[in-house]
Structures are given as C-alpha cells and as structure tokens.
Image: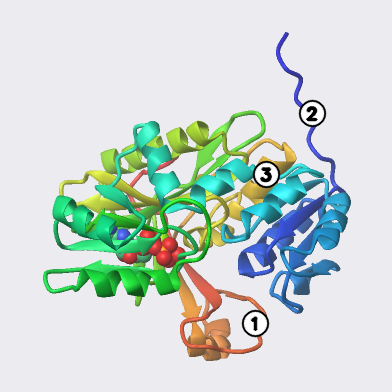
Amino acid sequence: MPMQLPPPLPPGATIGILGGGQLGRMLVLAAARLGYRAIVFSPEANAPAAQVTNGTIIAAYDDERALARFAAESNVVTYEFENIPFATAAAVADRALVRPSPEVLAICQDRNREKAFLARVGVPVTANIPIADAADLVAAVGQIGRPAVLKSARFGYDGKGQVRIDDTTDLAGAWAELQSAAGTGSGPAGILEAWVDFALEISVIVARSVHGETKAFVPVQNIHEHHILKRTIAPAPIAAPVAAAALDLAHAIARGMGLIGVMAIEMFVGHDGRLLVNELAPRPHNSGHWTIDACPTSQFEQCVRAITGLPLGSTAPFADAVMDNLLGAEADDWLRIAAEPGARLHLYGKDSIRPGRKMGHVTRLTARGASENGA
Ligand SMILES: Nc1ncnc2c1ncn2[C@@H]1O[C@H](COP(=O)(O)OP(=O)(O)OP(=O)(O)O)[C@@H](O)[C@H]1O
Ligand SMILES: [Mg+2]
C-alpha cells in the first residue's frame, strides 16, 4: 500500500525558524501572507526576523530547555542559515519535524561531505582533496597543482576561511592561516580545490516538497565584490542549453538529497559552457531575493509551501530583474532609492552599519527579455 502522507499544515499552524537574520525575516513575512504564524529562535535580541514576529525565543543554540520549548511551540521547524550547530538541529528534530532534515544540514555544513555527496550523485565539481594537516596540504598541492584554494571545511561564509594558493604561497603559512579560521567538528578541517577559471558564476534555487515534487527558479548570475554578493542578474546571460543543464543538476541534487525545503546551488560556468557545482545552501539564498518582486511565488513562499506540505507555486518570472545588495553605508541611500520610480527597496532593520554588512537590497525590474530559460 502506498504510504499515506500527512495533510498540509493548515493556516494558523506555527513555523519555527532557527536563526534571526534577514532570511528569517523574509521567511516570516512570506509565512504570514499564507496565514501561518512563526516563532524565531535567535541568540540575538532585536534580530531582523525577531522584529517581525511576536513569537521569539532569545537563547543560545545549546540551551536545551529553550530548544525544547521552541520545538513544542512549532508545527514544523526550518533554519535560515546552515551554520547553526548540528546538535541544535538534531535536538529539535527529536521533538519536532525539522525540514530540511538534519542529515541535509550535515552534508551542507561540511565541504568535504558536500563534495562526496555531489560525486555520489554524479554532479561535476572541481578537483578537490580533503586536508587534515600540513602534510596533507603539501601532498594535495603536488597533485592538484597551483593555483588552488584552501578552504575551511566548516563555517565558511562570504569567502571567510579561504586561502588562495598561487605560485609563491608558503604552504605551512597557508595551513596556519586556515586553522585559525576553522571551527571544530569531526572530519578533516580543510579542503583543497583546484582554482576554476570560470566565465561567470550562477546559482539555481530549487524546491522539493513533502510529495517529492521539485521546482526551480531560472538560473541567475551572481557578481561578488570582496567575496560578498553584490549583484544578482535574472535570468543569467547564458545560452539556453547551459541554463537547461543547470536546472537538470538542481533537480537531481534536490532529489538525491531527499530535500524538503529550498536549496541554493552555486555553480561556475566555464568558458566552454561546462558547469561545475561550487556549493550548496539548504535554505533561501541572497541570490533569490529578486523572486519576491519578479515571480508569482518568492523563494521564501516556496520554502514555506515545501515544508508545510502545500503544492509548490509557479516560479515563472513575469519580469527580468537586477538585485543589488545594500552593503554597509550604501543603505544610507534609502531615501533616494525609495524615491526612485520602480525600485523595490527592502531594508532588514539592522541598527548598526558595519562595512560589508548586508543592510538591505533593491530590486529593479525590466520587461522580460527574449531569453527563455524557464524552469
Ligand atoms: N575553486 C574555486 N575557483 C575559483 N574561484 C573560487 C573557487 N572557490 C571559490 N571561489 C570564489 O570565491 C567565492 C566564495 O567561495 P565559496 O562560495 O566557496 O565560499 P563562501 O565563503 O561559502 O561564500 P558565500 O557564503 O558568499 O557563498 C566564490 O563565489 C568564487 O567567486
Ligand atoms: Mg558561495
């Protein structure tokens, strides 16, 4: 007999969100639109997500009593960034539904596990070798050659915990530098990757529902400045077969992972149009913010739909879009942007401006172009 799936969570049910940043904030807003309540678990009071919900638990990620209370109040739990401790997700999963599952989180938290998973499902990645100590690094650079990049296996974001290895880099120094950035955890602390001479960077955001249905948004181009996402262009300026191949990879990864929720997949596009997957994020992603303003269903609503058991929504964009992050003092421009016809301004409610801090974003729409990269 086929397994009976539980009915979708009805409006009024509560979505628990681990993490209080801007992704959580936009998830809460999308959940509210569909009639769901949200409760935010965050170590920081007045976090961006905590400002837009009245259910908030301010506690440390290892506070077991607070986690138990959070689980008891949530009908389903998700997370808005992948660097929450695995033990936190596992403790909540003992008491509540956690989607995506802690197993998905464990893969995406560790670059070595992520690369092993991708290899297992036949997804192309750049040459890579796990690095546990300085001797491993010497051997791996001998094998992969230079240039390469040494990354911490865990807790990297915005290019932190990465050391480029070029012709003159001293390997002992590179290993020491990496170790000071690497967090604790099991398995090799580092990974060496061959440097990719790519034409451009793209990402695909894919959702998979409780029912196994998958849907993706069109591939977008991402432009980084100082390792931080600066601009996303939707759709990416790539040939239709390349876009189709990127979408195929995204659907295959979501299925292979048994994902329930949304996942961002970052890829490099080679000068020959070949794709290499760089990394996965099992949550809404900065490169999907444009979907709020240019698609019938945003990535945040899609996440809510996926984890509550609703049907996934349409991802076909009704406009092309350019999304610019407002980093640090760029957010001081809010009044000018607010006055700009057609500019869609989003501010995250962060009180202190720091250089490079993601304070908000602005999306500008244009008529849909001729390129048909539809999902
Ligand atoms: N093997 C590589 N070859 C060439 N460039 C790379 C390679 N790995 C990473 N980069 C560059 O560095 C950027 C950041 O790397 P990556 O996405 O792996 O790390 P991250 O710290 O998790 O970044 P983020 O949190 O912004 O996604 C990439 O977007 C890309 O521009
Ligand atoms: Mg990245």
Residue underneath mark 3? 99
Q: How far apart are the two marked residues, 3 and 1, measured between alpha carbons?
A: 27 Å
Where, quadrant-wise, is the C terminus in this rendering? top left
The residue under label 1 is 350
Q: In the picture shown, does residue 132 fall above or below 272?
A: below
The amino acid marked with disc number 2 is: Pro
Quadrant in the rendering for residue 27: bottom right
State left or right for residue 371 relative to residue 14: left
Please, which residue is most extreme toward the left here? 167
For the residue labelled by badge 2, is the local secondary structure a helix, a strand or a loop?
Answer: loop
Earlier residue among tags 3 and 1: 3
| Distance between mark 2 and mark 1 Cα atoms | 38 Å
Residue 86 x/y as whole percent: 62, 53
Q: Earlier in the sequence, mark 2 or mark 1?
A: 2
| Mark 3 vs 1: CB contact within 8 A | no
Percent position (x, y) of residue 243?
33, 43
Give me the residue at 64% from left, 70% from top.
21
Q: Position of residue 53 (x, y in %)?
A: 81, 67
Identify whether 332 is placed above or below 321: below
**Crowding near pointer 1: few (<14 within 10 Å), some, many (20+)?**
some
Image quadrant in which you'd find residue 22: bottom right
Please tell me which residue lies in front, 308 or 164. Answer: 164
